[in-house]
Amino acid sequence: MFKRILVPFDGSTIAEQALHKAVELAALTGAELFLLTVYRHHSMLEASFSMVRPADPGNLDSVLRDHAQGVVDHGRKVAHAAGAKQVRAFIKPGQPARTIVAWAKEREIDLIVIGSRGLGSIEGYLLGSVSHKVTGLADCPVLVI
């Protein structure tokens, strides 16, 4: 039935619920389980418009990438605690919905299991949530939890 299941994971409570459901489905079908955390690329142009100017801003992309790595590592631990035997976890910069869908297509994912609401900003309320966008863009079935 399903050979490859993707869980976009942002560390939210609903993302953890989606992960638990994906672990169940993977156990039932023998599918591989993949986690993907997408972080927003921070451009220097955006930084130049910031009203806050720290003395040493450092490399903001590195900070965001490190945070994303922590989130996906936490997701891997949650999946193992829920009974997953093997979980492959990845991070990727980009716009969340489009990055999730492109990543799923590249890796021939059979099912995306995603939380209905994550840690998105008010932009999600105005422009549509990531899960809503993923359901509209994905070539494979999407289970929204």
Image (cartoon, rainbow, N blue to C red):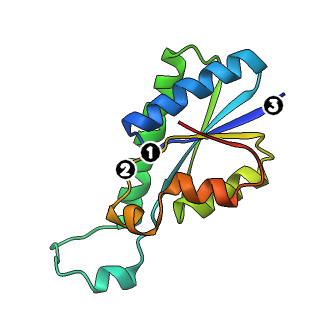
Relative to 45, 129 lies left or right:
right
Q: Is residue 125 visible?
A: yes
- Give me the disc on residue 132: none
| Residue at the image point whose x is 77% and y is 20% from the top | 29
**Residue 4: image location, x then y, percent:** 76, 35
State the SS at label 2. Answer: loop
In the picture, measured across the screen, residue 17 lies left or right of residue 3, that is left
Numbered disc 1: secondary structure: loop
Q: Which residue is mark 3?
A: 3
From the top left corner, tell me how far across and down residue 33 is, in percent: 67, 30
Cβ atoms at labels 2 and 1 below 8 Å apart: yes
The answer to whether one can see residue 100 in this image is: no
Residue beneath label 1, please?
10
Residue 41: % across, % down: 46, 68
Name the image quarter holding residue 109: top right
The amino acid on which the numbered mark 3 sits, given as a three-letter code, is Lys
Q: Is residue 80 above or below residue 37?
A: above
Going 35% across and 57% down the picture, which residue do you hit? Answer: 63
Gap in Å between the C-alphas at discs 3 and 1?
A: 23 Å
| Amino acid marked by disc 2 | Leu
Q: Is residue 133 above or below residue 1?
A: below
Q: Please tell me in which quadrant of the rendered image residue 24 appears.
A: top right
Q: Which residue is mark 2?
A: 119
User: Going from the N terminus, do you reach mark 3 or mark 2 first?
Assistant: 3
- Image quadrant holding the N terminus, namely top right
Q: Residue at x 73, y 16 (%)?
A: 28
| Mark 2 or 1, closer to the camera | 2
Residues at marks 2 and 1, CA–CA distance in whole angstroms: 7 Å
Q: Quadrant of residue 59?
A: bottom left
| Left/right of residue 107 with respect to residue 53 in the rendered view | right
